[in-house]
Amino acid sequence: MRRLRATVERVYAAVPFYRRALDAARVSPKDIRSLDDLRRLPFTTKQDLRDNYPFGMFAVPMENVVRIHASSGTTGQATVVGYTARDIDTWSNLMARALAAAGAHRGDMVHNAYGYGLFTGGLGAHYGAERLGASVIPISGGNTKRQIMIMKDFGATILTATPSFALHLAEVAEELGVDFRSLKLRAGVFGAEPWSEEMRREIERSLNLSAVDIYGLSEVMGPGVAVECLEAKKGLHVFEDHFIPEIVHPETLDPMPYGEEGELVFTTVTKEAFPLLRYRTRDITTLSPEPCVCGRTHVRMGRVRGRSDDMLIIRGVNVFPSQIESVLLEVEEVEPHYQLVLEREGSLDVLTVVVEVGERTFSDEIKKLQSLEKRIETNIKEYCGVSAKVKLVEPKTITRSEGKAQRVIDNRMI
C-alpha cells in the first residue's frame, strides 16, 4: 500500500499524462487510502504509450535513464520503456527469482536463446541468470545448428527461449542426428508467446527437459513478472511485491473476482523510470489465491489463453489460436508447426488451418490425407465451436521462427 501511494504521488508530480488522467477521474494521490481504492485509478493502454512516444511517459529526467527498450511496433507505433539503475537492479533480482523457481541455481549453464536488442527477453534473462550466479551463454536467436553444437559442447543445463524456437531446435537437432537425451539440459524457461499444455508435453518429450512458463511484457518490466514453479507447474506466481495484478471484464472493465476469466491489468509499485497505473495487458487469464505446494504465497495467474485483441471472431464465435493449437497437438500425424489464415469470401470470414504433417504421413495416399483433414476439421468444430478448413502441407513448408512465431495471417483487410 505504501508503494502504491508513493507511485501515484510520483506519477502525478512527474508525468503530465497521469496528472491529466487523474484530474479527469477526480482522483488525487491523497485519495488512495487502501488497496480497494485501486479501482478508482484510470486505466493505461498501449495507445496511451504510443501517443506519448518516445519518452512522454517517463517519470525521471533522461540523465537518470540508463537503459531503453522498445517493442517492435509491428502492430503500430513502437512503445518505448526506460529503466533507471535501480530498475535494472530490481529486474535482475526478479529474473533471478523466476529462474530459481524454475529450478536453476548457481553453477548452472544457461543457454539464452531469447533475442537481444530492443526486445527485453534476452537481456532480462541474461542479467537474471548472472544475478543468480549461473554462467550465461548469450547466444540470442538464429544460427540454429550452431546453437545445438554449443549446447552440446558447453554442457548447457538450462534453456531460455520462445516455445516455438525450442521446437525448432528439436527439429534441427533431429536432422543433425543429435539426441537431446545425450545433452545435460534439465529445465527450460519458455515465454514471450502463448503456448498450450500440449505444446509443453511436446517440448518436454523432444528436448528431454522440464518446461516452465514465464510471463512478462516490456511495458510492465520485461520477463520476470510471473513464473511457474518447477514443483507444481499449475499457474504462474505473480511477484505482487512489485506488480499489483487485477482481472477486469474486457468490455465493461469492471473488476472481477478470483477464478473469473478476464483481462489482466497491472499496476507497478517499484519502477522508477516508467511506472504504470492499471496497464491493460490485453492478456486473457485468471487469478487464484490458493496456496501452492511449493510454499510461495503470491497469487497465481493461469496460463494466458490468448489476448483480447488477438482473439479471432469467426462468424460470431470467439476463438484463440491456443485453442486450435491444443487440438492440433492431440493429432499424432501432424507436426507442431501451423498457421491460421483468415480470409473473407463474400460477406463471410473463412478460417484455414495450415499444418505440417510428418514425412511418413505426407507420403501416404491422397485418400488418407483427405481423411486426416476431415478428422482435424471435426475436432476443431467440436472443441472450438467454429468451422475451419484444414490444409495439410509437407514438412518444413511453414517458415520457422527465431523469435515469436507468426501464428495468424489475417488477409481480411487486403
Image (cartoon, rainbow, N blue to C red):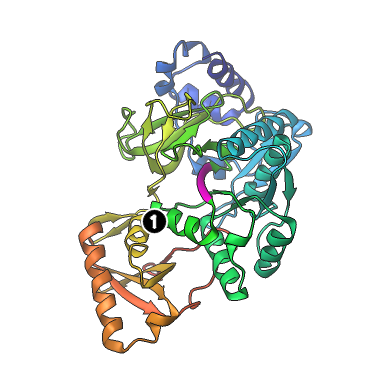
Q: Is residue 121 above or below residue 22?
A: below
What residue type is disc 1 on? Glu
> In the picture, which quadrant includes the C terminus?
bottom left
Closest to the observer, 322 or 275 = 322
Q: Is residue 389 above or below residue 129?
A: below
Closest to the observer, 247 or 230 = 230
Tell me if residue 347 can be seen: no
Say left or right for 259 vs 401.
Answer: left
Q: Position of residue 304 (x, y in %)?
A: 41, 45
Q: Is residue 101 magenta?
A: no
* Farthest-out residue, front: 182
Closest to the observer, 124 or 33 = 124
Say left or right for 199 vs 345.
Answer: right
Provide the residue designation for mark 1.
198
Q: Position of residue 394 (x, y in %)?
A: 44, 81
Q: Position of residue 261 (x, y in %)?
A: 32, 38
Q: Which residues are magenta?
A: 210-215
Identify the residue at image location x=22%, y=57%: 316
Q: The residue tagged with tag 1: helix, strand or loop? A: helix
Closest to the observer, 189 or 40 = 189
Q: Position of residue 406 (x, y in %)?
A: 49, 63
Identify the residue at image location x=45%, y=59%: 202
**Magenta residues: mostly which secondary structure?**
strand
